[in-house]
Image: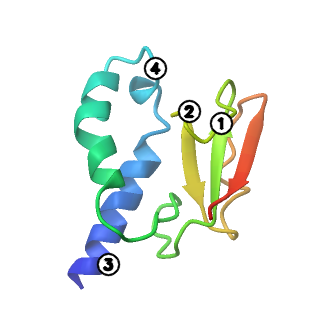
Amino acid sequence: MEHLMVRKLRGALAWCSAADDFQIGGKAREGWEKLCVPLLQSGSEKKPCCAIGCPKDAEFEIFYEGAVRPDDSISTDACSEHVGELLTDAPVHHIYLIQ
């Protein structure tokens, strides 16, 4: 049960990362990088899908606008079922398969 709750919390945190406040230049960016990013990167479990309530592991990483490389930070993770609905109104998306 605790494992599922951790997955849900990590998924919710990753989903929140799309908010403008957490983007480069956003008022919460510094806190995001110091507190949230390390939490999302910790542990050996796979990345969760960022769709709210989805228990699946992410299969794709979606980068927005100017983010074109996997080391850029404007991204979200999705399972194959939710990859379409996690696209934004950004003019360009780059979608990578998670290895």
Q: Nearer the viewer, residue 56 or 38?
A: 38
Query: Badge 2: how crowded within 10 Å, few (<14), some, or many (20+)?
Result: few
Instruction: State yes or no: discs 1 and 2 in contact (Cβ < 8 Å).
Output: yes
Q: Which residue is mark 1?
A: 69
59 sits left or right of 25 in the view: right
Amino acid type, callout 1 = Arg
Q: Which residue is mark 4?
A: 24
Marks 3 and 2 in Cβ contact (< 8 Å) = no
Which numbered disc, 4 or 3, marks the residue closer to the eye? 4
Quadrant (top left/top right/bottom left/bottom right) for the C terminus: bottom right
**Tag 4: amino acid:** Ile
Residue on which disc 2 sits:
72
First in sequence: mark 2 vs mark 4 = 4
Assign a secondary structure to mark 1. Answer: loop
Labelled pair 4, 1 in contact (Cβ < 8 Å):
no
Q: Are marks 4 and 3 in contact (CB under 8 Å)?
A: no
